[in-house]
Every structure is written in structure tokens, then in C-alpha cells.
Image (cartoon, grey):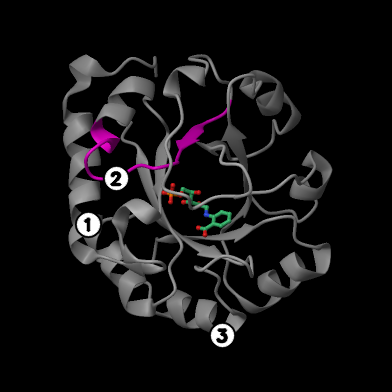
Amino acid sequence: MSARIKICGFTRPEDALAAARLGADAIGLVFYAPSPRHVSIAQAQAIIAALPPFVSVVALFVNASREEVENVLAHCAIDILQFHGEESPEFCRSFQRPYLKAVRVQPGTDLMALAAQYHDARGLLTDAFVEGAHGGTGKTFDWTLIPPQLPLPLVLSGGLDEHNVAAAVARVSPAAVDVSSGVESGKGIKSPQRMASFIAAVRAAQNDVSISMRPV
Ligand SMILES: O=C(O)c1ccccc1NCC(=O)[C@H](O)[C@H](O)COP(=O)(O)O
């Protein structure tokens, strides 16, 4: 099955519409105030309103309160929640919505144990561990730290771009890839050219089934 493509960190409706037209499966909205990609509820509503049908909207939080998450859910048409901090499994599953749990991977990270704890997640999103940052860093991590038998769908992220995503897909055969910095021309400003190149690279990698390593 082909890897789904999520592009994260939109701040402008026109960029999200361009992503959808280019074939992105999902767009991510960052509800985390310290991020340069943070969106308000009004911005999120405008971005969502610009999308055609059948593009999933992912709302990203970092250690948000229950009230913050519920406020976003009350005002925006969100399909999937993404928890990018130290949220407990109980917190993640308490909204009765599909969710992704993000994990910042470094040597010693036990992804099998995390997959067991967050067993009802729609997927485990693996990002790079960077001291003092929660995400959107543009940094890659060592993909060999991902166990081949991970029991949850893998959403690979962290420093992906049009130049390395084909190798990433070939190496770990993720269920989905997630990118932010790697398709930008500025923080929160997505480049249509870079998004097109990224999506083309994912699709091209998948046509070369001979180099896929993860069993389906
Ligand atoms: O994008 C941000 O600014 C951000 C801030 C805090 C937590 C998560 C954030 N983004 C999360 C994403 O989903 C990114 O797509 C993921 O971290 C990969 O980012 P990048 O390495 O820039 O592609």
C-alpha cells in the first residue's frame, strides 16, 4: 500500500489548498503557541474551509490542557488529533477521536513499549529528538532505531525533504510520511514547488517495490 502523505504546519489557506491539489492526504495544524507555525482558531477555520473533500485535518498539540483540545474540537472540523508532547495514553484516548502519538526518537527509545502503551493510536509518529524542541526542527534521526515489527502503523517524520524521502520510504516502508520544514520557503510558508517535489519523490519511491524492506 502506498505511503500516505501528511504535510504539517500550515498557516495559510492557499498553501493548504495547494497541498491538497498536489495530492497530500492530510494537513496538520499546530495548536502550540510557541511554534512559529502556530494557528489561531480563526486561522484554522479559514484553512479548513479552503480544503476540498477527503483531505484529513490533523490538529497538533504539545502538552495542551483538556480545555484547549476541547475548544479546538468544538470550533474546527478536526479528523485526527496528534499529541506531540508527554501526553499519557489515557489523556490521548479520552477525546473519543482517532489520534497519533508522536515520539521523539533517540538511542534507547523503546518504540515497541510505546506502541504497546498507545496501542489504540492510529499510528506512532516518529520524529527526531532535539534537545529543547518538540518538533518541526528539520532534523533527521537514525531510522535503524525503528523496529521492523512495530505493531502500529508508522508515520515517519523528522527532517524529511524531497532529497531524502525516497530513501526513507525504501528503508522503513512507513504507513505515512510527515513533513514540515522540508517543504517550506519560510517558517509556516509552504512552497508549492517543494511540496510537488516531495510528493513526486514519495510516489516514485513506491513504484520501485524491489527496494522495499518492511513486510506488508
Ligand atoms: O512544526 C512545529 O513547529 C512543531 C512544533 C512543536 C511540536 C511539533 C511541531 N511540528 C510537528 C510536525 O508534525 C512536524 O511535521 C514534524 O515535527 C517534522 O518536522 P520537520 O522535521 O520540520 O519536517
Decide which of 117, 142 is in the foreground and name it.
Answer: 142
Report which residue position mark 2 lands on: 161
Looking at the rendered structure, the kind of residue marked 1 is Arg
Q: Main secondary structure of the magenta part?
A: loop
Looking at the rendered structure, the secondary structure element under dot 3 is helix
Decide which of 136, 48 is in the foreground and name it.
Answer: 136
Q: Gap in Å between the C-alphas at discs 2 and 3?
A: 29 Å
Q: In the rendered structure, find residue 82 and report the number of the disc placed on it.
A: none
> Is residue 72 found left or right of 17 in the rendered image?
right
| Residues drawn in magenta | 152-166
Residue at the spot 49% in from the left edge and 53% down from the top edge: 136
Report which residue position mark 1 lands on: 194
Q: Which badge, 1 or 2, is on the more N-terminal residue?
A: 2
Looking at the rendered structure, the secondary structure element under dot 1 is helix
Report which residue position mark 3 lands on: 42
Tell me if the residue at label 2 has its CB under 8 Å from ligand 1.
yes
Residue 51 in view, yes or no: yes
